[in-house]
Structure formats: C-alpha cells, structure tokens
Image (cartoon, rainbow, N blue to C red):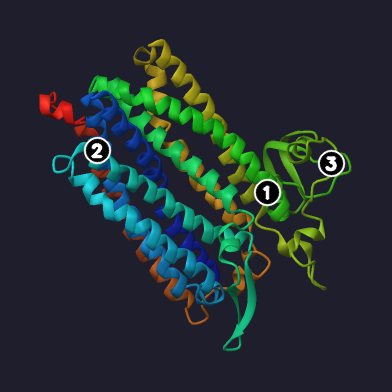
C-alpha cells in the first residue's frame, strides 16, 4: 500500500514542532527567573544571586541556540510540505512571522550577547537592562507565534480573494488578526506553562544539589524564589485553563467535545470525565469516571445546561454539507481526550507538588526530606510532558481543519512532494534531532555538574556601584 504524503507530512511537522517546543518554554520561563535573580542581586548586593544569574544564563544561552536552530527548520516546511497552505495564509501568517522577527527575535538575540558575555564588561545596571530586554524579547516572540497559530483556530480580520485562480486569505484588519477570538486566552495559558517549566527546572536542579550536598547555599536561595514562583503560576494555570476551555467551547465546539469525550447531546447536562477511553465506534467513554453535569457547570454555571456534542451539526462551520457524515468532521477523539486529560492531570499535580515543596521550604525541613527532594528532581519531566500534551491537544483537536472552517489539512499539503521524499526527510531529520537532543542533554548535564560559580566578595567600589 502506497504511503500517504499528507500523513507523512503531518508526522514530520509534528516531530519538528515537538522537538522545537522543548526549548522555548525553558527560555521564556528562565528569562523571567533570570530577571528576578539578577534584580535580587542588585537590590541586596548578595553575590549568591549573581552567581545564580550567571549560572542560569549559561543554561539559557545553550537552550536558546537549540530553539533557534530547530525553529528555522520548522518554518522551511511551510514552503516544502505545505505549499497550498502557505499560499492560502501567506498574507496573514507572513505578517505575524515578520513582526516576530522584527519586534521580538532581534530584540532577544541582539541583547543576548551582552547578557551572556557582558558580566565583567559593562555596569551591573546595564547588564540587568540587557537581561530584562532578552526576557521581554522571548515573551514577545511567543506573542507573535501565538497570534499566527491562533488565527488558524479562530480566523478574523480577513477576506477571501482569488489570485492566479486560487482562493487565498487576505488581511483586512491587522488588529483583528492579532486579537482574534483565541489569541489572548491561548497566549496567557502558553506563557504560564512556560513559567511553570522554568520554575520546575530551577527546582529540579536545586533539589539535586541538596541531595548531593553540593552548592547548598545557592540551591536554598534558588528554591526560595522558584518554589513560590512555580506555585503561583501553577495555580494561575488552573484559572487560565478554565478560561481557555470556555473559549474553545464557544469558538471550536468540536474540539471541546473531543477533549471531554462528549459524543451525544444530553438533556440532563454533560458529565465531566476524570479519565477513561473515548470510544468513537460505540460513541461513549469506556472505563470512565465522570462527575454528572460537571462539564455543564464548568462551562455555564448550571449542572443541566446543554453542551454542544459531537453529534450536533453545529460543530461544522457553515453547517454539514449534504451527503457527508458528521463523524467526518470529528478530530481524533480518543487522542484528543487523552492528551487533554494528561495536561489537566499534570497541572493539578504541579499545584500539589509545588505547594508541598513550598511548605517544607518555609518550615526549613526540605533539605532533610530526601524523598521529597528526589520527587522534585524528576518533577521537571512533568512540565515538558504537559507543554507537549497541551500543544498537541490544541492542534489535534482542530482537525480536520488546518485553518478552522476555511481549509482542511488534507487539502493543504504540497502537490509536488511525493511520499518517498517526505519519508526520507522525516528519517534524516529524526536522526539529526536525536543527535542534537543527546548533545544538548550532555552539555546541559555538564553545566549543571559544574554548578554556580564561586564569586569573591565585592570590593568597596563594586558595592557602591550596586
């Protein structure tokens, strides 16, 4: 049986995005923590915080380099594997990516060298400004990427025109594109996920140092900042996630129905499933535990309010075309269900774990609770999985659309690229990414083993400068 080039292109893009998205959440989260560490140093004059800022700057720079390299490859695929899509959204997607390069990437990369190499070459206040600007640049980069991606989910500020016999989307209102119905919700939730990622990375490394009896004082100071930082944003993720779910129910009802395994419209309200298997053949959640009316209450504040289900023609933008089945417009339901519930479950775990760690730290008992330190060391895997699961759920959940209501994924691929060519590049990129991932982990481990630098006490002149 001949391979499907569209399916292979989707797998390749998923691999590329999944690999790339390992790095931006780390740099965004670490960028904010770097500002806090360095700002605390300037405010207190305590060089332990300067050592922490220097140490995490090295980790930031290493991760930033991998993020840039993998991101460039991802963008090339728009032209190679997804030429029809690129032609359709080029006017809109290109504007957002150009804004990202001009207003975010240049700011971030322009001050990165000063942040990494300027410690002993510029004044401390100047260096702090560079650190702030790098952090702002990383956040602005996320803003424009989220704008471009959100437009695919909830198109706005455009009209359709014909160019060279093909229909394409053209901007009519730039700010309507920027503030399309899902941008703000998705941006807030994405940034919070990145902050949690950065916080747990710092917590994991600090807990490792305490377990091994190395760099104990810097580790304690790291935890003093990272634990409350992570707890606050873990709680914030709960509220931002709720707002995002309500917005998805309004703008993409099929996605929300798939997330919750809501196959049939029920008169008594929709249950909220904690776990289960969404069976598309039987159109029910098997082995599931659900809270009766829970989904209706979360979305509408009423346990018996109706929720649009997968059997409702309203899930199809513009209505169900004659002769087509409603299931043709379903996303992969069980995959969407499992990814969404994995993200939500991990989010609840983050709240509990950061709270327990924060409580132990306040009581001064954390260094003695080795079982908790061991959990905190491996807890960094959780935000990686949660960020990947959340992003995948959002993209899988909008299928069969690549641009919601306007262009199907099956119609968006390049017509001139064969399955064999896609498969070859998929294998090559997979091997390259594997090598890069191993190298990143090896270098990262070496930098963590080295730890924060030992800094001498500042001279009188240096203290005056601070």
Estimate the x, y position of residue 58 in percent, counting from the top left: 24, 42
Q: CA distance from mark 3 to mark 2?
A: 56 Å
**Disc marking residue 305:** 3
In the image as oriented, which residue stretches furthest toward the bottom?
164
Q: Against 399, is 291 above or below?
A: above
Label pair 3/2, CB-CB below 8 angstroms: no
Of the numbered discs in the image, which one, if any, rests on residue 125?
Answer: 2
The structure residue drawn at horizontal position 22% and vertical position 33%, both measured from the top left corner, is: 449
Residue at the limit of the structure toward the front, as seen here = 464
Query: Mark 3 or mark 2: which comes first in sequence?
Result: 2
Where, by quadrant of the figure, is residue 411 drawn?
A: bottom right
Q: Which mark is residue 247?
A: 1
Q: Closer to the N terminus: mark 2 or mark 1?
A: 2
Return the residue nearer the eye: 5 or 302: 302
Circle 1 sits in a helix, a strand or a loop, which is it?
helix
Q: Mark 3, mark 2: which one is toward the viewer?
A: 2
Nearest to the observer: residue 154 or residue 62: 154
Rendering coords of residue 95 (x, y %)? 48, 68
Q: Secondary structure at mark 2?
A: helix
At a point 45% along the width and 57% down the height, the residue shown is 17
């Amino acid at each position: 049986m001949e391979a499907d080039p569209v399916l292979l292109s989707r797998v390749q893009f998923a691999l590329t995005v999944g690999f790339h998205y390992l790095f931006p959440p780390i740099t965004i989260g670490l960028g904010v923590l770097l500002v806090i560490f360095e700002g605390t140093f300037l405010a207190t004059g305590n060089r332990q915080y300067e050592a922490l800022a220097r140490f995490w700057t090295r980790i930031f720079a290493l991760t930033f380099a991998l993020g840039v390299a993998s991101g460039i490859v991802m963008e090339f695929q728009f032209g190679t594997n997804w030429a029809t899509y690129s032609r359709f959204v080029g006017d809109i997607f290109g504007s957002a990516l150009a804004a990202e390069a001009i207003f975010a990437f240049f700011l971030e990369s322009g001050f990165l060298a000063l942040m990494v190499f300027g410690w002993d070459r510029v004044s401390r206040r100047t260096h702090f400004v560079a650190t702030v600007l790098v952090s702002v640049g990383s956040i602005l980069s996320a803003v424009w990427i989220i704008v471009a991606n959100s437009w695919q989910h909830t198109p706005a500020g455009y009209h359709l025109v014909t160019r060279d016999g093909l229909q394409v989307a053209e901007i009519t209102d730039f700010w309507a594109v920027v503030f399309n119905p899902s941008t703000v919700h998705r941006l807030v939730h994405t940034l919070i996920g990145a902050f949690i990622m950065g916080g747990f990375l710092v917590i994991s490394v600090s807990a490792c140092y305490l377990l091994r009896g190395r760099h104990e004082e810097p580790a304690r100071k790291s935890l003093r900042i990272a634990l409350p930082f992570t707890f606050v944003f873990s709680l914030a993720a709960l509220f931002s996630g709720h707002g995002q779910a309500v917005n998805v129910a309004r703008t993409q009802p099929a996605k929300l129905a798939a997330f919750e395994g809501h196959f049939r419209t029920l008169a008594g309200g929709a249950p909220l499933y904690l776990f289960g298997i969404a069976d598309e053949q039987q159109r029910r959640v098997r082995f599931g535990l659900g809270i009766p009316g829970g989904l209706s209450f979360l979305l509408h504040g009423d346990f018996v309010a109706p929720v649009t289900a997968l059997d409702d023609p309203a899930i199809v933008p513009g209505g169900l075309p004659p002769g087509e089945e409603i299931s043709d417009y379903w996303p992969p339901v069980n995959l969407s269900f499992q990814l969404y519930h994995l993200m939500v479950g991990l989010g609840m775990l983050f709240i509990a774990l950061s709270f327990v760690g924060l409580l132990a730290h306040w009581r001064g008992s954390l260094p003695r609770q080795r079982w908790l330190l061991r959990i905190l060391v491996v807890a960094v895997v959780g935000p990686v999985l949660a960020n990947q699961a959340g992003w995948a759920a959002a993209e899988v959940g909008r299928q069969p659309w690549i641009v919601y209501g306007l262009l199907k994924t099956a119609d968006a691929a390049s017509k001139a690229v064969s399955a064999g060519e896609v498969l070859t590049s998929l294998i090559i990129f997979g091997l390259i990414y594997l090598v890069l991932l191993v190298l990143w982990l090896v270098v990262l481990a070496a930098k963590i083993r080295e730890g924060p630098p030992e800094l001498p006490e500042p001279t009188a002149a240096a203290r005056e400068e601070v």
